[in-house]
Amino acid sequence: MISEQVDGLLITPVQTEKRSIHMLQESGIPFVLVARYFDDVDTDYVVADDVQGGYLATAHLIEKGHEKIAFINGPPYDSSAIDDLYCPR
């Protein structure tokens, strides 16, 4: 993307490899992370409130009479969305 001289990027990182993020910062190309952030990298990001969303979804299921409700988590286990569920900011 750097060589294509794009004006900006929206990025949804799927791995914790931050080398590409650092390269983008050095390039000066503006970018925003979508649905994920890294605590130790100073970037702009946009995320949903997954904790509140989970609460509202569960409350809806309970209102509909459901009692056996499960949260199923799969890889990647190291995403900021999962981290926020267990250690909210």
Image (cartoon, rainbow, N blue to C red):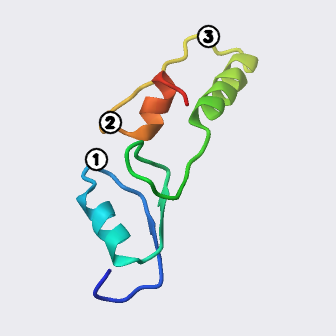
Give SS at disc 1: loop
* Three-letter amino acid code of the residue under disc 3: Glu
Q: Nearer the viewer, residue 62 or 6?
A: 6
Identify the mark at residue 8; answer none if there is no mark. Answer: none
- Label 3: which residue? 67
* Residue 58 position (above or below residue 37): above
Q: On the picture, is 72 further left or further right than 62?
A: left
* Three-letter amino acid code of the residue under disc 2: Asp
Asked whether the residues under the numbered discs 1 and 2 touch, taking CB atoms below 8 Å apart as contact, a structural biologist would say: yes
Q: Position of residue 67 (x, y in %)?
A: 61, 10
Give the residue drawn at x 24%, y 52%. Answer: 17
Which image quarter holds the C terminus? top right
Q: Position of residue 75 (x, y in %)?
A: 30, 36
- Label 1: which residue? 16
* Residue 67 position (above or below residue 15): above
**Number of residues whose C-alpha sits closer than 10 Å to that of mark 3, classed few (under 14), some (14–19) or many (20 or more):** few
Identify the mark at residue 78; answer none if there is no mark. Answer: 2
Give the residue drawn at x 47%, y 84%. Answer: 7
Which image quarter holds the N terminus? bottom left
Numbered disc in front, either 3 or 2: 2
Give the residue drawn at x 33%, y 32%. Answer: 74
Asked whether the residues under the numbered discs 1 and 3 touch, taking CB atoms below 8 Å apart as contact, a structural biologist would say: no
